[in-house]
Amino acid sequence: MLEFKNITVSKNGITLLEDISLKIETGKLTVLIGPNACGKTTLLQTLNGSSKVTGGEIILNGEDYLSLPPKERAKRLSFLPQVHSVIPSIPVKTLVSHGRFPYLGFSRRSGEEDKKIVNDAMIKTGVDEYSSAGVDTLSGGVRQRAFIAMQLAQQSDTIIADEPATYLDQPSRKKITEIYSGLRNEGKTVVLVLHELSTALEIADRIIVMKDRKIAAEGTPKQIISSGIITDVFGVGIKRFSDDEGDYLITV
């Protein structure tokens, strides 16, 4: 279990989050939703050090996560940030291999097992055919899958991704959410920030709603829909419709 206990985040004397407590269930897919600037990214960035925790603690599977050395954190939890501001001009396979760094010695020399893990991650995300291509030459959707492959190569049991499908076309978004849903089905603990409400409600085991830098609601998708919190926070409703291919949720 990943637990945020009374977390406070401050920067330059300004409190960004205060006394946030939240439990993320092991082996489940949890999605954080909320309007822009509500604190979702700030909360998750406490896990990679981009947001400085000034109060409270983070417990991961019974361990004080913040007290662990960086390499040990990376073995337990992988974090894919929201924006890749610099796209490296390196081959995809080299990028994915970076996911093995927490496990390598001083020489950073990969062994056969490391190479197999990297290849398996590329196959799972469908980027193996781009192995030698420069990351900076890829389309947005393929590039994002390459970063996810790097994340999978860490072989962490807890996987965090902040808006992994934003700015991508519909087929790319669908592929990426399928990858993360598949990881949940393998027993991984997956936490995503998503902006597309219908997708979040369709794929999540549990939904966390944030508003005004606080936890506004949490529960199963069914509980969140029936509570009316979606309308309160986003000003839209959720409708379900069905056809021969299945059931769908749409915002109205």
Image (spheres, rainbow, N blue to C red):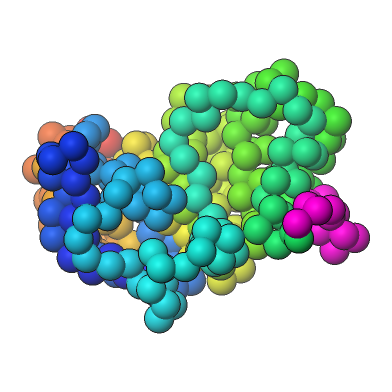
Residue at left 19%, top 46%?
Answer: 10
Residue at left 75%, top 28%?
Answer: 90
**x then y, percent, for residue 186:** 61, 68
The overriding secondary structure of the stretch rendered in magenta is helix
| Horizontal side, residue 229 vs residue 136: left or right | left
185 and 85: which is toward the camera: 85
**Residue 140 is one of the magenta-drawn residues:** no
Residue at left 51%, top 64%?
Answer: 69
The total of numbered circles placed on residues is 0
Query: What residue occupies the far front of the structure in this picture?
Result: 106
Vertical placement of residue 9 versus 114, above or below = above
Residue at left 72%, top 18%?
Answer: 137
Question: Which residues are the magenta region?
Answer: 106-120
Q: Quadrant of the N terminus?
A: bottom left
**x then y, percent, for residue 80:** 51, 44
| Horizontal side, residue 87 vs residue 44: left or right | right
